[in-house]
Image (tube, helix red, strand yellow):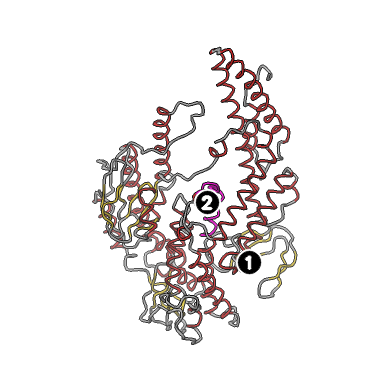
Amino acid sequence: MDPATIEFIGEKCMISIIPNFSNEPLHLIYGSVGPFRAGFPVFVPLWLAAHLRKQQKCRIVPPEWMELETLEEIKEEEKRSKFFTKMPSEHYMVVAQLVMSTAPDDVPRCEELRTVIKDIFDIRESKLRTSIDAFIKGEGTYAKLDNLTLLEMHSVRPILPYSLDHIARYQRMATASQRDTSMLGMNTTISGSGSGSGSMSNSYFTQ
Amino acid sequence: MSDTENPEQVLNEPDLSTEAAYANGFEDDDDEDAEPITAQKVLEILETAWTNEICAPELLQHQTDMLELMLSQVAHMEEQMKDLDKNDFRFVVHQMELERIRYIMASYLRCRLQKIETYTQHILNQEATRDAADKRLSPEEAKYAQDFASHVDEYFNKVATQYMPNQQRGEAEQRIVTPNLMSHVFLKANIAVSGVIVGVDDEEVDLAPGSQHIIPYQLVADLIHKNQAQLI
Amino acid sequence: MSRSNKMFGDKAFDLLKDLKRSSQTIPAFDDDGVRQVLEEIKAIFEENVAQASSYNSSGDRSLWPLLNYRHAALQRNKRCLLAYLYERMQRIKALRWEFGPIIPGDIKQALCEPEVQFFNNYSKSLAAYMRSVGDGQGIDLTGNLRPPKSLYIEVRCVEDYGKFELDDGEVVHLKKNSQHYLPRAQVETLVRQGILQHIA
């Protein structure tokens, strides 16, 4: 999944807006939204919120967690915790980026928020890198990834699954070439790679 | 969805009020006993099928029924929207949603075609061993796969293989490209699943609902198939 | 058999290297190269057949490594040649998605006849498939390539294109350097072909 796809999926998140127009409910295939009443908050999918905001038809109400103190706490907790902490939204990065880029004026202390969110993301990314390193060195083939968000998982995408796939392939080839020294030598058999699942000492993945 | 209205527009509900008509396109006339399925539910199923397909190394079960339903729903809504002013708020929002849905369907089918083109012979061989109910390819895809295989053969033969001496038996088989089923995937459990084998040494774990894992695809292919877990 | 400074399989490997190095969408089909590789394959094979029979009759074990070596060279030649054709086939398929059912003239010159034939077959199959999806309702898979961001996009015209009619009948004049705010879905193809440029 590329970043555009992850963003596309994240755009389904519901977010509160305050429209400056009134309209009866819309029956979308995803489900109904509205009624819209000028000045009253209503939940809509993020993609719709972004569109209406660009058309100046609403104000976006940032989600509760997009607030400096809350995010500072999350950041401290993330630093303290041995594992990945649970984020307030499965798509916190997508939501934050989209809201802050389409409606910076609707978000109090937008610039400061941007920094904290980036900090949280960086702390988590660095934990992730350490974990992957340990995971691969420990010859693991399985790990629990609780509390990682979609974007975070896929941010390591080229490295994590593919390097494991390569290692597994080498192991299979090594096994196969020991067994099969025939002239063509190309019949790599799918045999199990000889490695256990990840119980890693130096890892932030929950076990 | 968060509002108090019931978003589940049951599709064969005879509600033809202007807006609601957009969302109730399907009539289940070929199958009287079928549970009425909402457009929202169909979309959810397609979305899951789409992400599963993107993430799975092999071709998964086709979703012809769901696709047909959604295509007619989209066509129906377009029809309903024809008379609306292009700048009408409702037109724009519905149009945006349809764009999203069209993208999901197109991306999903493209992803399948890509796998069909990459693993053509392997997929055809496997299909030949499957019962009608377990076919992975839709009838249209099956035709496409057959045609594609013969176009490729023709091309290779005209340019090269016909001039190669002694096409040893088995060489054609060696050229069959197969997906790496042991490649690692990200998985999310939809329900509690116990006793999933996660390593070659038969180590087992229980998956809690909503838990996420990285694991070789083959060990969980069955869970995907049964919708007990999905790929992310 | 081969020139002294050349190894078996060099030519076949060159085919691949040239293809990889080329910055063109598809470099010209290397007719000569392909023929040389096929000749080398044939020559190696004939030599091996000849010696294999003497190996069988005389039982001279000293021939064994040579037979093996030639066999490996033969396999490598085949493999490189097929990889060359396969990679070209991938690029030819991509043309269909990028440019539609007609190959642009300058690219067509680079293809050999069986490749053009393959393109036409592929193009027809794909079109037939797209028409047949959903019990004949059809879906265009060559559009909607990226997740939709907004219905309208801001574009600049890179070259004079002329009149362009939108689905609602409105006609826009796409003149070089003119800027337009157009429905994304309808201009996606022009953007992909480089006639329009998406400006953020």
Secondary structure mostly taken by the magenta-highlighted segment of the chain: helix
Q: In the depicted view, which residue is nearer to us: B118 or C182?
A: B118
Residue A7 vertical position relative to residue B163 in the rendered view, above or below: below
Residue type, label 2: Lys
Residue A61 vertical position relative to residue C6 in the rendered view, above or below: below
For label 1, the residue is C186
User: What stretch of residues is rendered in magenta?
Assistant: B108-125
User: Are there few (<14), some (14-19), or many (20+) residues within 10 Å of tag 2?
Assistant: many
For label 2, the residue is B115
Which chain is disc 2 placed on?
B
Let me know if residue A2 appears in the view. Answer: no
Q: CA distance from mark 2 to mark 1?
A: 28 Å
**Residue found at the far bottom of this picture:** B17
Residue B148 vertical position relative to residue B12 in the rendered view, above or below: above
Q: Quadrant of the N terminus of chain B?
A: bottom left
Q: Is residue B98 left or right of residue C91?
A: left
Location of residue C141 (image quadrant): bottom right
Q: In the depicted view, which residue is nearer to us: C148 or A124?
A: C148
**Spot occupied by residue A82 in the image (x, y as percentages of width and height):** 24, 49
Residue A131 included in the magenta stretch of the image: no
Q: Disc 2 or disc 1, which is closer to the eye?
A: 2
Q: Say whether mark 1 and mark 2 are on the same chain.
A: no
Disc 2 element: helix
**Spot occupied by residue A47 in the image (x, y as percentages of width and height):** 46, 68
Q: Is residue B159 left or right of residue B187?
A: right
